Amino acid sequence: MNKVTNIEPVFLLGTARSGTTMLGETLLSCHAEIAYLGEINYLWKYGHDFSFYDDIDECRYTDNAISVIRNQIVRQAIGRNPRAKIFIDKTPANCLRVEVLLRAFPNAKFIHLTRNGEAVARSAVNEWLGQAGSALDSAEVRKKPLLSRLYLTIKRKSNLRNRVFDFRSFVSLMAYFPDLFRLLARMLGFNAKSYWGPKFKGIKELVKSQSLNSVCYKQWEHCHDQAIESLEYVERNKILNVQYELICRHPRRELENIFSFLELPVKNEVIEQMVAKVINR
């Protein structure tokens, strides 16, 4: 718990395309006492912005970097919801750095969301190819006028309001330009090579030697296994394991379990609204 704000850290830990957006953004963010931060990978890479990989060893973070990360996360949480008792961060790459999360927030809770690996891989392939409906460079987005596409991409990808908070973070913006330019190039119809999802050591070699479906499966497998291994060192009462498939089949039961774990009261009508969103998704 942060001693100054008393806001509780909760990490929604799950591989990319495992359902973390549905659980975090569509459902849990509806609660009046939750500050939902979404994905803040740029913050967790503070001091290592120019590293291609996301699995950066905890020992490489300075105390100052950890302090900046913690303070900026709390600041964003309060800015999103001043009444919040907890914040939820669902950055997929967090599966690769549980030790860093715990160094910043030693008393953090974890909701570990899992999903069938083959289903994750099939969904991830569409993201890599820009064929998912919600992707910034998807076929659906490409139908929009050019200026609309450029504006939407720069706005959502750059996130300048939160990303720039000191001189170092301003300079580090250059680290994100290559990804932004590749995304813009793909939106304009060029065959620009772009990585998607958490980047772990060895992924470049996989991309060169294996099919995209295999790469996506191994991306899921690596992140899934790393999260399970790291959570072995976390107190059992700080972890709630949740299955995506069970949320879809028994949303009320699973949501009630989640709010019990979070120790947040929730009105029956709020639960009903969330259940309806799962059923009608």
Image (cartoon, grey):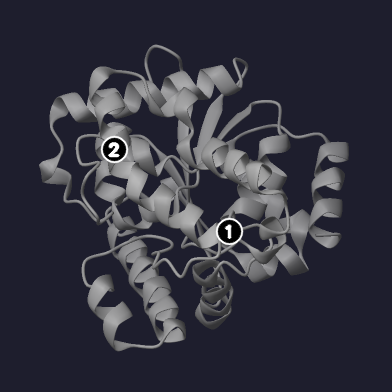
Disc 2 and disc 1: Cα gap in Å?
A: 21 Å
User: Dots 2 and 1: beta carbons under 8 Å?
Assistant: no
Q: Quarter of the image holding residue 249?
A: bottom right
Q: Residues within 10 Å of mark 2 (few under 14, many from 20)?
A: few
* Side of 151 relative to 277 (left or right): left
Which residue sits at x=55%, y=65%? 189
**Residue 13, x across and y down, in percent:** 46, 53
Q: Please, what secondary structure does the residue beneath circle 1 have?
A: loop
- Amino acid carrying label 2: it is Met
On screen, 4 above or below 265?
above
- In front of the other: 186 or 243: 186
Residue drawn at the location 61% of the way across and 46% of the way down:
24
Relative to residue 217, is residue 29 drawn left or right?
A: right
On the image, the x and y values in percent for residue 196 come to 43, 63
* Percent of width and height locating residue 42: 36, 39
Q: Residue at x 71, y 49 (%)?
A: 145
Q: Is residue 1 visible?
A: no
Whether 145 is drawn above or below 140: the answer is above
- Give the mark nearer the N terminus: 2 vs 1: 1
- Regarding residue 246, the answer to whether it shows in the image is yes
Quadrant, the C terminus: bottom right
Tell me, for residue 174, which label it has, or none: 2
Residue 108: percent from left, percent from top: 39, 38
**Number of numbered discs overlaid on the protein picture:** 2
Label 1 neighbour load within 10 Å: few <14, some 14-19, many 20+: many
Query: Which mark, by number, is residue 96?
Result: none
Q: At x 44% / y 18%, what residue is drawn?
A: 75
Q: Nearer the viewer, residue 104 or 109?
A: 104
Residue that mark 1 sits on: 137
Which residue is nearer to you in this view: 103 or 48? 48
Label 1 sits on what residue type? Asp
